[in-house]
Each structure stands twice: as C-alpha cells, then as structure tokens.
Amino acid sequence: MSDASARVADSTGNWVDTRAPQWARPYLRLSRFDRPIGSWLLLMPCWWSAALASGMAHDVRGLPLTIVLFFIGAFAMRGAGCAWNDITDRDLDDKVERTRSRPLPAGHITVKQALAFLVALALVGFVVLLQFNRFAVMTGIASLLVVAIYPFMKRVTWWPQVFLGLAFSWGALMGFAVTFGRIDVTALVLYAGSIAWVIGYDTIYAHQDAEDDALIGVKSTARLFGAHTHQALILFYGVAVMLIGVALASGDARWPAWLGLAAFAAHLAWQIMRLRIDDPELCLRLFKSNKYAGLLLFAGLLADAAMRAQLS
C-alpha cells in the first residue's frame, strides 16, 4: 500500500504526509495530529478559565505552568477522543465521502491497534491531570462520561452538538478547579457560554457532511436548522457572548477582558455574515477560524489577569 493511498481525503499535504515516519502516520491521522484545530478548540475554554480564575485570585504565579499543562492535556485527550470517535463510527465513516479514507474504515490500522493508541494518549492526559489538586483530578475524570457517550448521540438525537459542547467546554470548569479547588457560579456560566459557542461552530462544521448524513440517517443541528442556520447561529453565538459576559462580570473582570470579549463577538459576527452553507470548503475555513476567536478572548483574559495581579 502506498503512502499516498493512506492519506485522509480532507487532510493532505500536511506535516504527517511529508515528515512523519510511515509507520506512525495512521496513528497520527487517527488522533488528528495532522489537523490540530480540534485540539485548539478543546484548549480554548481551558485557557479562558485558567486566566479568569487567576485574575479573580489576583495571582498569576502558577498560570504559565497551568497553560502549558492544559496545552499538553488538550492535545493528548483530543487525540484519544478522536480515536474513540473513529472506533465507534467506523461503520458510518465508511459511508461518507469525506471520512471513508480515515485509518480505520480504510483498513490502515486495526481496532485493537486504535484502542492501544487511545489508552496511551489517555495515560498522557492522566499524568498531566495528576499535576493538579485532588478536586481538579476528579473533575477531569468526570469528563470521560460525556466523552464516552458523545459519538453515539448522532444516532439518537438531532442535537449531538450539545453533547460535543458538554465535552469540549469542560475546560471552562478545569481552570477554577485547579486554581480554587472548587467550581463556582462564574465557572458554570463560563461553561454554559462555551457550550453555546461549540454548538454554533460545530453546526458550521457539520454542514460539510449534511448530504451524506441525510443519506445514512445521521442527525445533526446542521440538518435540523438547514436554511435557518444563520438565524440559529445568531441565537447560539449571541447566547455565548452574553453568558461569557455574565461570567466576566461575576468575576469582576477589568477592561482588557471586555475588550477581548468584544473582539470575540466581532469574529463570530463575521463568521455568520460570511457563511454559505452550500460551500463545504468555506464552512471548513470558518469552523477553523474559531481558534482565532478563542485566542482573542484568551488574550483579553490574560491581560486582565496580569493587570489584576500587578495592582493587588
């Protein structure tokens, strides 16, 4: 089998195709290390909460290490989550044009090999988790229940994006668990705001597969909203901005955080204006751009935390 034939249809010409050892390529593709946007999106709520909690504590001394550990943990656990998703979805991925060339449906690795790699990545995530306090460790472990059930939701509900939001927004709780050893109202509101954000951007993403999903009976908010997607995005992105704003107010955030939220909101508005649901390539670009939306908000929260620590 040639390396070219092992490539994933919607991710070619990346560092895995050109630089990674050939034996490692199916595993790197399985865990999406060839397209790390999902890891960045999983990371953003982690960084938001770490920065906001540090600002509330008026202490940023532990923030650099927390940022690094969250980065490692997000990439490891997103890789493990993708492996689990592909194991459970291998029968469906074989029927979708964009996903049938993934390592499992294409036969480049076995289910046992995928499970072994999943366990290895999960162990990396667990080692990261052990660097925090006991409450944070238990909070992190609790997320596994949502991660485990998410791949099955597209079979039973039109709202699988809600369950993705529950999983991908868990980091909004982790920063508070690490900093304070508890989860308070501010953390829960930030979590809810992040869930609304995830529903919005994953609806955009799901429009790439809407036609194939309809043929094989897979449900999604993209199919549910259809031609009303723009209105739905106004609702969910609007709720995201509002709830994150409530979290900032609850956390006594200063002007840099509000400036970051304004930039975040402007980026989401730009996505809605640009979106054409019948253009899969544009949908993918807009979905990926949420990394920058998240970083804009994080930059504001980080500046806010530094300001509050300096003034304390």
Image (cartoon, rainbow, N blue to C red):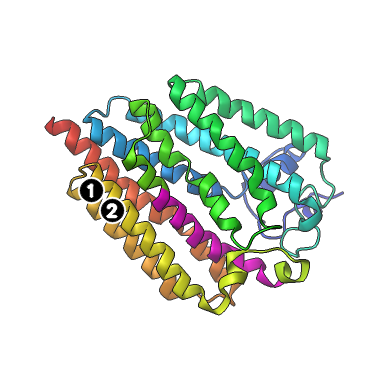
Q: Residue at x 40, y 30 (%)?
A: 177
Quarter of the image with the C terminus is: top left
Callout 2 secondary element: helix
State the mark number for residue 168.
none
Instruction: Return the x and y of residue 114 as percentages of the image width and height.
Output: 76, 38
Which image quadrant is residue 66 in? top left
Pinpoint residue 32: horizontal percent, then vertical percent.
64, 46
Q: Is residue 100 visible?
A: no
Location of residue 27 with respect to 105 vertically, above or below: above
Q: Quadrant of residue 20?
A: top right
Q: Amino acid at mark 2?
A: Gly
* Residue at x 33%, y 61% (from the top left corner): 265
Mark 2 — residue? 245
Numbered range of the magenta stretch: 192-211
Query: Which residue reaches farthest left?
Result: 311
Pick the front one: 104 or 184: 184
Q: Left of 239 or right of it: where is 148?
A: right
Asked whether residue 71 appears in the rendered view, the answer is: yes
Name the amino acid, label 1.
Ala
Considering the numbered disc 1 on the image, is that residue within a helix, a strand or a loop? helix
Q: Position of residue 107 (x, y in %)?
A: 85, 48
In the picture of the structure, the residue carrying the numbered disc 1 is: 249
- Name of the residue lying farthest toward the right: 1
Which sits in the foreground, 185 or 253?
Answer: 185
Q: Residue at x 54, y 70 (%)?
A: 282
Residue at 24% x, 37% y is 305
Q: Label 1: few (<14), some or many (≥20) within 10 Å?
A: some
- Is residue 138 magenta-colored? no
Distance, label 2 to label 1, CA atoms, is 6 Å
> Eyeballing the image, is 219 above or below 110?
below
